[in-house]
Image (tube, rainbow, N blue to C red):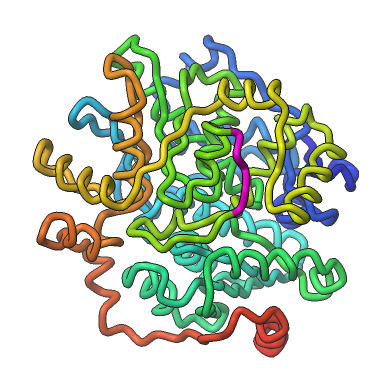
Amino acid sequence: MRYISTRGGIAPITFKDAVMMGLASDGGLLLPQSYPAVSREKLESWRKLTYAELAFEIISLYVSDIPAEDLKSLINRSYSTFTHPDVTPLIKKNGVYILELFHGVTLAFKDVALQFLGNMFEYILAERKQTLNIIGATSGDTGSAAIHGVRGKSGISIFILHPYGKTSEVQALQMTSVTDANVHNIAVRGTFDDCQDMVKELFGDLEFKEKYSLGAVNSINWARVLAQVVYYFYAWLRVTDTTDAAVHFSVPTGNFGDIFAGYVAKRMGLPVDKLLLATNENNILTRFINASDYSLGEVVATVSPSMDIQIASNFERYLFHLFADDSSRLKEAFVELKESGRISFTQVEMTQVRADFCSASVDQSATLQTIRDFYAETDYLLDPHTAVGVKAALDLLPPDSARVCLATAHPAKFSETVERSLGFQPPPPESVKKLYGKPTRCELMDADIEKIRDFFIAHVG
């Protein structure tokens, strides 16, 4: 299996090179040259596998340059850190299935990919006798999951930018309370998009990237998307153990990475009926799907802060396929976006988009009401991002179908919002209780690329 760039400017590379490259050297995102087809017979043969066993079967289809036993070891080590034996358990409540993706070390779905990516980085660096300096931007969960994925690992330093005051208290503490020497937190006076733009600019400086051995943990790294593909297969296999109904997935998303993993699973042959993309008021993706309107707006601060994004970095991967894998058409679209703040699409293209996805935008009032109603009906606590997905599923997906809602974070990560809705805070897990009172370390900085660059150079390992 080889990997190519959406921008068409690199020769095909191996999986290990794709992991280490992160963002392609031509500024594009990496994708496999083709998607392995999974037959219904093969799918049925996976039905009794554990999560780690299934992960090996799927991930190994994309990895041809790591010995099978080494890959199994990396996968087993990655998922041994999860607190639930199923890793991503499925629970049926009020006519929907909740796919709990928050049983990892930082209580968010990002752990599923970043525990794997951290171990993969360490494995490749040791093999190549190299070092790596990771730079990433986060709206909350990616940063803490990335930090916990690589903290203390030899040969790796990590620099995470997050928007100051725009994450939840627990998200901030999960990042800044990690004071390992190889971890550097930067709180930026600005938005997530400001953080992401600066990270992209640093990666776009190819001389800088090569000189300082930059690596990516954001979902621009293909290995992250690949690891997330697994839980779509896992959920489908568990749901279809007990029903013949059509299976739909409702995915709360801001950066398009999580739902793109579902799109990959579908392209591989997973019998998914609909992929429902759920947004909050930052609804550029919903406007795109429902009204052909991909135009930039201002970022709105909401009670689901991990989705407070306008520019979805993983959207480029989908556009590449929408444009029939035409890098020239893709580059023209991004020139249009830069010049006019929007991208135009043909009728044929939009017909394909609506065959791939449906979408709904859920505002803060409806999010809070969904947390309230769902708890009253089921005694189950939703975090605000999951509530966005649940509300969209209840409104848009057929009630006689199997509606799988991705639960992207533990409600204790957003206790202030849960309390605002229900009048009490969710019981915190032990890992959250231990955060309070711990020493923290964080640098508060303006959204100034040169200041960020200087800080990085001064602290690089």
Residue 293 within the magenta-colored segment of the rendering: yes
Q: Which residues are magenta?
A: 292-296
Q: Position of residue 219 (x, y in %)?
A: 59, 52
Q: Is residue 77 left or right of residue 456?
A: left
Q: Position of residue 70 (x, y in %)?
A: 62, 46
Q: Position of residue 382 (x, y in %)?
A: 24, 47
Work out whether residue 185 can be spotted.
no
Q: Residue at x 70, y 43 (%)?
A: 343
Residue 246 within the magenta-colored segment of the rendering: no
Q: Residue at x 76, y 70 (%)?
A: 213
Q: Residue at x 45, y 54 (%)?
A: 307
Image quarter of residue 431:
bottom left
Magenta span: predominant SS is loop
Work out whether residue 366 can be spotted.
yes
Q: Residue at x 83, y 43 (%)?
A: 332
Judge by depth and name the residue closer to the eye, 425 or 68. 425
Q: Quadrant of the C terminus?
A: bottom right
Q: Is residue 154 left or right of residue 215?
A: left
Judge by depth and name the residue closer to the eye, 219 or 377. 377
Q: Quadrant of the N terminus?
A: top right
Q: Position of residue 114 (x, y in %)?
A: 52, 55
Image quarter of residue 380:
top left
